[in-house]
Amino acid sequence: MPVSFLSPTQCDNYAKYPADLPADIVTSLFFLDDHDIEWIASKRGDFSRLGYALQLASLRFIGTFISDLNKIPHVVIERIASQIKIDDPQNCILIYQESKQRWRHTVEIRSRYGYVEFAEKGSRFRLGRILCALCWTGTDRPGVLFDHAVCWLSTNKILLPGITILERFVAEIRSRMEDRLWRMLIKKALFLSSKNDQLRASL
């Protein structure tokens, strides 16, 4: 099976914010609870607090950290800034983009909120089992399996890997299950053929 099977839409949307976010989605999904706000308040400087909050919100929404906070939709920035009482979010983002704290924050967020890398022990194996089951019990196209994988990784707090890494992983799993199915069908066909030969010989 070819490795490159993703649609242009899937490629464009992977680990990114959608072009348009409805107001009700922003209100409901970009919510910081009391524990989040208390922890964010411990950071020094408005730029640090906003940067941390945006990193956390992005991770929860798109499944990974975002390298350029300027690509976060303005409505999301305003929503997060209002909750932690930041008056000048755009200036804060400019400062945060140049700071070293952003890299320390990603490590801290992963540890505090229980996120792991795709390459860490057990992550690939667990996803592989899920995809094998889907392949064995259904006829989902590889693009659908890819969407299942993205959803499962995000739900289980596993950072989304590079898109080509995940695409190749899905392709390998599906190819492996197809080979297994064909081997079983061939084995069954040979068995039935042998039984037929025995039956004819006994007549």
Image (spheres, rainbow, N blue to C red):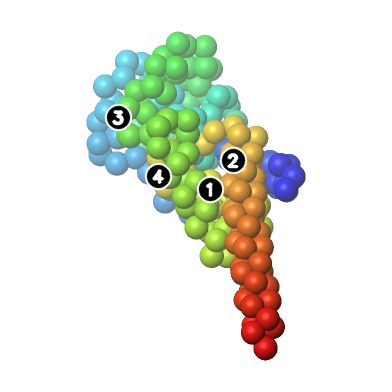
Alpha carbon separation for disc pair 4 and 1: 11 Å
- Above or below, 199 relative to 55: below
Q: Is residue 9 visible?
A: yes
Tag 1 near tag 2, CB within 8 Å: yes
Side of 84 where 21 appears, left or right: right
Alpha carbon separation for disc pair 3 and 1: 24 Å
**Quick one: label 3 or label 2, which is nearer the N terminus?**
3
Alpha carbon separation for disc pair 3 and 4: 15 Å
Residue 56: x %, y % from top left: 41, 32
Q: Quadrant of residue 193?
A: bottom right
Side of 150 where 156 appears, left or right: left
Residue shown at 64% from the left, 53% from the top? 179
The crowding category of the residue bearing disc 3, from other C-alpha atoms within 10 Å (few below 14, some 14 to 19, many at least 20), is few
- Residue indicated by mark 2: 169
**Quick one: label 4 or label 2, which is nearer the N terminus?**
4
- Residue indicated by mark 3: 112
